[in-house]
Image (spheres, rainbow, N blue to C red):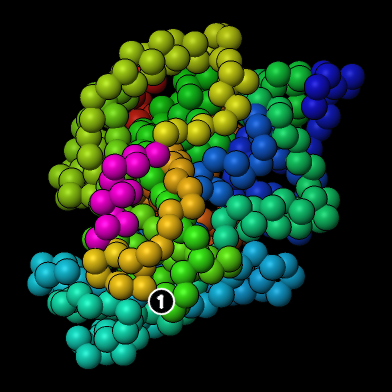
């Protein structure tokens, strides 16, 4: 919207953030008969929701998050009957390069089997049968035939259209500047176009969620991680299942090309929040340090300058950040592509069509926050998906809708509370 609202509109629920989590939550709320609006500072789904790898996976999901992944499968399958966004149950093959990686996969599978999971172990001969293109010597693999793939950008366009058709009001180019609190209760958002009121408000703004929560002194322990991806031109004879490994990962695309990335090549830059949340993030970082590169650059000064603009009673210029479009790590992607070409001859002449990067919202335990905010009735947060949001987005939206309407769920909402971090209790630190 380009002009202020003549009369502040009111909805049952208003969500800040038009990514997959915000749109799915809005869709399920609308199915319950509530009036719903979704606000986005730019174009819905433009940031990480359309820049991810496009995997709908269960393999290697945390046990707490596995129910979300499993419950999302039938929703993706149902939606695929309504629109063509490249969804298919292609299966996912997770390869172990050595015995350490294989033991990790075996340990995960042992825990997952107690929850009725459908993955199975593959020996070397079975890997060759399922992945004849590879000439690598893999220590072992897990295969989940129920996992699938989709085109993230097409899926987001479909979901936005589906939500609008259901009666959800989507308002692009509407930056939320702060959460409106009156009488100790969340009752709307202040936007660049004026105030919009609601009985319940949801912060589902991805990497921007921390700063938005800061406008009402809520501490959200969240950091940003940059992940780079490339797309090839069409490749004949390539693998159909999703392939995951520490050397390369790939997914067949609708156009016959492949999305290629490396799972242990994400980058995080040292910022003021890196020190602020060091205690919360350090345990998981030490476990996952092989998957993440920590770098020092101009980000520290830039974020320090930016964060001073955000908070209670401050200008909060979210409209200055319409789209997060970082520069991809072309050197790492080139090395990843070289590894792929060496392992699979069908990619030897594959041409790189384009590269891009996205910024992932990460929390200390890598589990999402799907939670009410105890301090302010009516305020909810849905963020911190730590690179898992696309695949589990449908069930996460359903869980959030049930949470807001007070309905029971079987997806483990107790694992995803904001309170688990202890950042907003008695004597908590300033944001």
| Quadrant housing residue 31 | bottom right
- Residue drawn at point x = 72 percent, y = 34 percent: 172
- Residue drawn at point x = 65 percent, y = 64 percent: 85
Dot 1 falls on a residue whose secondary structure is loop
| Quadrant housing residue 358 | top left
Rendered location of residue 127, percent (x, y)? 27, 84
**Magenta part of the chain:** 328-339
Image quadrant in which the C terminus is located: top left
Q: Is residue 125 left or right of residue 165?
A: left
Q: Is residue 334 left or right of residue 162?
A: left
**Residue 85 magenta-highlighted:** no
Which one is nearer the viewer's eye here, 24 or 347?
347
Rendered location of residue 206, percent (x, y)? 50, 39
- Residue drawn at point x = 69 percent, y = 68 percent: 84
- Identify the residue position indicated by label 1 in the image: 239
- Compared to residue 85, the image places residue 267 above or below, namely above
């Amino acid at each position: 919207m380009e002009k202020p609202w003549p009369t502040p509109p009111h909805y049952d629920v208003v969500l800040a953030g038009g990514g997959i989590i915000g749109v799915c939550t809005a869709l399920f709320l609308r199915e319950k008969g509530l009036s719903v609006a979704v606000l986005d500072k730019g174009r819905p789904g433009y940031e990480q929701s359309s820049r991810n790898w496009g995997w709908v996976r269960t393999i290697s999901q945390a046990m707490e998050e596995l129910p979300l992944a499993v419950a999302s499968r039938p929703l993706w399958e149902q939606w695929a009957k309504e629109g063509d966004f490249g969804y298919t149950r292609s299966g996912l093959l997770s390869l172990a390069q050595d015995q350490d990686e294989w033991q990790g996969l075996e340990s995960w599978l042992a825990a997952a089997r107690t929850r009725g999971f459908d993955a199975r172990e593959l020996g070397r001969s079975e890997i060759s049968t399922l992945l004849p293109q590879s000439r690598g010597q893999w220590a072992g693999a897990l295969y989940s035939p129920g996992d699938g793939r989709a085109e993230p950008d097409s899926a987001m366009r479909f979901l936005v259209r589906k939500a609008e058709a259901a009666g959800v009001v989507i308002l692009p180019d509407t930056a939320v500047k702060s959460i409106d609190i009156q009488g100790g209760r969340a009752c709307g958002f202040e936007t660049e176009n004026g105030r919009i009121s609601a009985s319940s408000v949801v912060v589902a703004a991805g990497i921007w969620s921390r700063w938005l929560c800061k406008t009402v002194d809520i501490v959200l322990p969240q950091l940003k991680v940059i992940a780079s991806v490339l797309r090839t031109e069409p490749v004949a004879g390539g693998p159909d299942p999703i392939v995951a490994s520490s050397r390369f990962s790939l997914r067949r695309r609708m156009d016959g090309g492949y999305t290629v990335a490396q799972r242990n090549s994400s980058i995080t830059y040292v910022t003021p929040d890196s020190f602020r949340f060091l205690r919360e993030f350090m345990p998981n970082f030490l476990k996952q340090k092989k998957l993440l590169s920590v770098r020092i650059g101009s980000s520290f000064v830039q974020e320090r300058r930016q964060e001073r603009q955000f908070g209670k009673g401050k200008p909060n210029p979210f409209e200055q950040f319409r789209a997060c479009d970082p520069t991809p790590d072309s050197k790492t992607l080139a090395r990843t592509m070289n590894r792929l070409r060496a392992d699979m001859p069908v990619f030897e002449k594959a041409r790189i069509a384009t590269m891009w990067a996205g910024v992932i919202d990460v929390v200390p335990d890598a589990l999402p926050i799907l939670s009410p905010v105890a301090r302010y009735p009516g305020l909810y947060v849905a963020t911190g998906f730590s690179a898992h949001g696309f695949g589990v987005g449908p069930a996460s939206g359903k869980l959030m809708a049930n949470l807001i309407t007070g309905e029971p769920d079987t997806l483990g909402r107790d694992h995803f509370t904001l309170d688990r971090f202890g950042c907003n209790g008695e004597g908590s630190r300033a944001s």
